Image: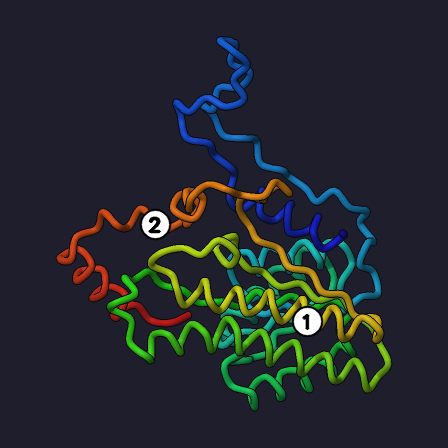
């Protein structure tokens, strides 16, 4: 629950939620209970005691930028000693110094390409050497791009699944095995997406890989709970209720974050594909 609160706070600070105007919600007859014409005020702090993670070690993939950086900052502020891992060591070091200077707690930078089992193994060994066994592991590293599925090459599919699914598996299984040997428990958190469950057009590699991550976490929760390991998944975005959907596929069409790209022309896809190919990886 503490990790969930951390992510909620980070999410609110990074991306203030905005409902599109002039949509009206929760109407009661002719009386409008809420007019969606403004953004919700972002949460300014995490709603946890300042020493919540004191004495804990947190390992965060993709911790140098974005939500990963935000979670690292929050965990460090709450007392954790953090290890952040990604491919770009210079970015990691800059982030580590920035966060540590603000919180007064150690933040270690470890280079790691989650797609490469040898790199993952080295990163885990280095992390344990400098900080000890982690009690919090966040699988945040990811990759994605939008494309019509008929344009996907085998390499494009492999690139996303290697980062998202295989990378999460290598990190989780690698750290998990070390924890089992050391007889220590831990809390694992994976960042997925709502379309891992619903599916979405134009991001089929990501949807498939994220669904695999959720399957992995469910499986290990059943198998490794006896070792004191807990597994949670958070899907930043809309959260569904327990009501069973019987909508003829309407939810899938509306919920997919990228389904509106059906309006993009073939010529526009060509231009975007050129831009994507020119973009350097992070």
- Element assignment for label 1: helix
Residue 81 appears in the rendering: no
Q: Position of residue 275 (x, y in %)?
A: 23, 63
Sequence-earlier tag: 1 or 2? 1
Residue at 35% x, 56% y is 201
Q: Can you say which quadrant of the picture contains the C terminus? A: bottom left
Residue wearing tag 1: 219
As rendered, which of 112 and 159 lies closer to the eye? 159
Relative horizontal placement of residue 80, taking residue 148 as reference (left or right) = right
Relative horizontal placement of residue 191, taking residue 153 as reference (left or right) = right
Residue found at the very far bottom of the displayed protein: 118
Q: How is the image coloured?
A: rainbow
Q: Which mark is residue 163?
A: none
Relative horizontal placement of residue 237, taking residue 184 as reference (left or right) = left
Relative horizontal placement of residue 173, taking residue 187 as reference (left or right) = left
Residue at 36% x, 63% y is 145
Q: Position of residue 230 (x, y in %)?
A: 76, 65
Q: Image height check: is 193 above or below 115?
A: above
| Location of residue 255 by image quarter | top left
- Element assignment for label 2: helix
Spatial separation of the CA atoms under disc 1 and disc 2: 30 Å
Residue at 58% x, 47% y is 11
Residue 38 appears in the rendering: yes
Q: Position of residue 4 (x, y in %)?
A: 69, 51
As rendered, which of 238 and 17 lies closer to the eye? 238
Residue wearing tag 2: 259
């Amino acid at each position: 629950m503490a990790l969930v609160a951390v992510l909620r706070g980070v999410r609110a600070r990074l991306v203030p939620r905005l409902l599109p105007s002039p949509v009206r919600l929760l109407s009661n007859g002719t009386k409008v209970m809420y007019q969606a014409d403004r953004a919700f005020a972002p949460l300014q702090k995490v709603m946890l005691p300042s020493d919540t993670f004191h004495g804990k070690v947190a390992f965060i993939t993709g911790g140098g930028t974005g939500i990963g950086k935000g979670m690292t900052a929050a965990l460090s502020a709450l007392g954790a000693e953090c290890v952040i891992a990604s491919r770009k060591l210079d970015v990691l070091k800059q982030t580590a110094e920035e966060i540590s200077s603000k919180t007064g707690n150690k933040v270690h930078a470890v280079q790691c390409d989650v797609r490469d089992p040898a790199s993952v193994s080295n990163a885990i060994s280095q992390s344990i050497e400098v900080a000890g066994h982690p009690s919090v592991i966040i699988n945040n590293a990811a990759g994605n791009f939008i494309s019509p599925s008929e344009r996907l090459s085998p390499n494009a599919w492999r690139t996303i699944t290697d980062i998202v699914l295989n990378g999460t598996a290598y990190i989780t299984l690698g750290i998990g095995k070390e924890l089992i040997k050391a007889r220590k428990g831990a809390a694992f958190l994976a960042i997925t997406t709502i379309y891992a469950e619903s599916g979405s057009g134009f991001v089929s590699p990501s949807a498939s890989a994220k669904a695999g991550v959720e399957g992995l976490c469910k499986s290990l929760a059943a198998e490794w709970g006896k070792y004191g390991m807990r597994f949670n998944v958070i899907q930043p975005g809309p959260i569904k209720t327990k009501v069973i959907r019987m909508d003829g596929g309407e939810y899938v069409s509306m919920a997919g974050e990228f389904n509106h790209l059906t309006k993009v022309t073939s010529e526009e896809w060509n231009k975007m594909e050129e831009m994507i190919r020119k973009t350097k990886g992070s």
